[in-house]
Image (cartoon, coloured by chain):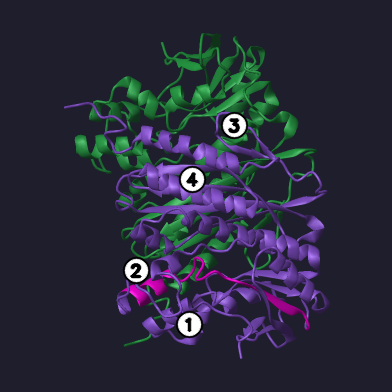
Chain colours: A purple, B green
Amino acid sequence: MAGLTYRAAGVDIDAGERLVDRIKPLAARTRTPLVMGSVGGFAGLCGLPPEMKDPVLVSGTDGVGTKLKLAFRSGVHDSIGIDLVAMCVNDIITCGATPLFFLDYFATGALDVTAGEAVIRGVARGCELAGCALLGGETAEMPGLYSPGEYDLAGFAVGAVERERVLDGSRTSAGDLLVGLASSGLHSNGYSLAQKALFERAGYDLDTRLDDLERPLGAALLEPTRIYARATAAMLEAGEVHALSHITGGGLPGNLPRVLPDGLVARLDRSAWPRSPLFDHVARAGAVAEVEMFRTFNMGLGLVAAVRPEDAAAVRQAAEDAGERAFLVGEIVTGEGPARVDLP
Amino acid sequence: MAGLTYRAAGVDIDAGERLVDRIKPLAARTRTPLVMGSVGGFAGLCGLPPEMKDPVLVSGTDGVGTKLKLAFRSGVHDSIGIDLVAMCVNDIITCGATPLFFLDYFATGALDVTAGEAVIRGVARGCELAGCALLGGETAEMPGLYSPGEYDLAGFAVGAVERERVLDGSRTSAGDLLVGLASSGLHSNGYSLAQKALFERAGYDLDTRLDDLERPLGAALLEPTRIYARATAAMLEAGEVHALSHITGGGLPGNLPRVLPDGLVARLDRSAWPRSPLFDHVARAGAVAEVEMFRTFNMGLGLVAAVRPEDAAAVRQAAEDAGERAFLVGEIVTGEGPARVDLP
């Protein structure tokens, strides 16, 4: 009986090392002046922005949910990492934070170095878009836990904000205007429902061409989540922003009230922004009620800001100048009870 | 045809919310004075230790590998979270950092609220042992990605260290003594090999009683990883510590050289510390060569410090006083070429 080795147990250390070698230059490109060399690679080291007097750390973790299955199904692995960074970074910027660094966790059953490299290339690209450093990561090879060709991804983002500038929504008041930033599609939420509707109910596949969609269905669904870090930095400079909400699972009704004081209502004019025809295809394919659509998907807005009314035009323009499509989508009015969204 | 809902697509938002409700008091117990209330829960907020003049952030991410399978197999879910915190925190303390906060990512196919709560209870317990706050986390329900009853876990730790006190190993020199902290067993590395050897080759199961093991095999294998944060804090106070190495995948030969300058050799006396009989059972069951054992497992030492010789006794004692078993396990000598470990 041959003696067991770690490799015979299903763990290919050499493949892991080959992947690390390929990741290094990708991570190096995201390096910022705050990053310090790390000895031994046990941990990543990063300084704080020297101009900050009393920085508070802001952190968040997220995954990309079953959007992963689209990457598996299509074999397109190089954009799901952008989604991962987006989901984490768009959370921390809601507090007014500047993203500093990011770490990823990539877990698979048997390491495919090429697919793994594509995934991390996306993560590094996301970090570049967010202006933060890819400071570290973990590649886990766990025989049997994942089906062949599948993997999971988790991300962690850390940013910093001057203590006196932490955005906590407390200054939001009736009369504030709501500036919405366009999403690029479903972003990274609702994919279990969307895939069930489109693939199982309607029988579409990745190559299906649907009315009003410029690209095949698979490509439209895989479109990466927008990363709003540069836009929100510009918006915070351009005017008095009282609150920022990242529209994730739970949609507008689930996420906007999270940053509103009780007694306020976010009244949205749903004709004020365009939404991808993709949402309508999902609704039709799955006979999904409109209220369920709004509670599951972003419905066209990836981030919403509550802004002092006299600054709304300038804040909207700043987002546009930073490369986002931005709209005045509603206003804050008074109401009774807990904060809520009104979608007349 | 009934209209699709998110729940019908396999995602149980209510279960997720029930789990969040159960996690809240667990996380609250880990709260430190540096943690700030977070609005809306998009992100976690944490200040920096006010006594630090020029803090550098130190971060790391890790999982627990196929030790997960032991939790699935045994149904014991409340200690694997301690392993998760240990793997991340033991990495960041090698730079001399004080752990500040931790975030976890918990992903499963269909959410089992009871098992999920047990997992997070372990994470919170780990945070208490490490003295850091459980600042946030993500629970992902991804139908189809995980087998029933299975899940994956990723962790992320952030600490801080005064810039001038970053431990980088550069001051390690010939004559330094090596202080090793006992591991509690396999910690969280080598479980693919160990399970293949013990369960497949030898045909043991969780309840098997083996010579010299006080507990059934399953319990011995599930023993949580030691968290060395309090010990290393005490050791750094007690004397001049030049380097700290966390003994993870790759074992002593893979991890000790990571924090040694070239031209130095860590000469270890393998009779200087006890090792759990568990390692011998794995070696025997799998006919695993001694060199492969040392490259895969920690072989009894979870962390090794290189210490100025005149301080070694005090540093060792400080670790003992902090609750660890600590041993003088070797010394640094000069050698040629890249840093390496010598195990005569």
* Image location (x, y in percent) of residue A153: 46, 53
On the image, numbered disc 2 is attached to which residue?
Answer: A207
Marks 3 and 1: CB-CB under 8 Å? no
Vertical comparison of A142 with B110: above or below: above
What residue is at 59 percent from the left and 77 percent from the top?
Answer: A252
- The disc at residue B84 is 4
Q: Amino acid at mark 1?
A: Glu
What residue is at 68 percent from the left and 56 percent from the top?
Answer: B45
Mark 2 or 1: the one toward you: 2
Q: CA distance from mark 3 to mark 1?
A: 49 Å
**Res. B26 in view:** no
Locate residue A322: give its quadrant.
bottom right
- The disc at residue B94 is 3
Mark 4 vs 3, N-terminal side: 4
Q: Are marks 3 and 2 on the same chain?
A: no
* Dot 1: element: helix
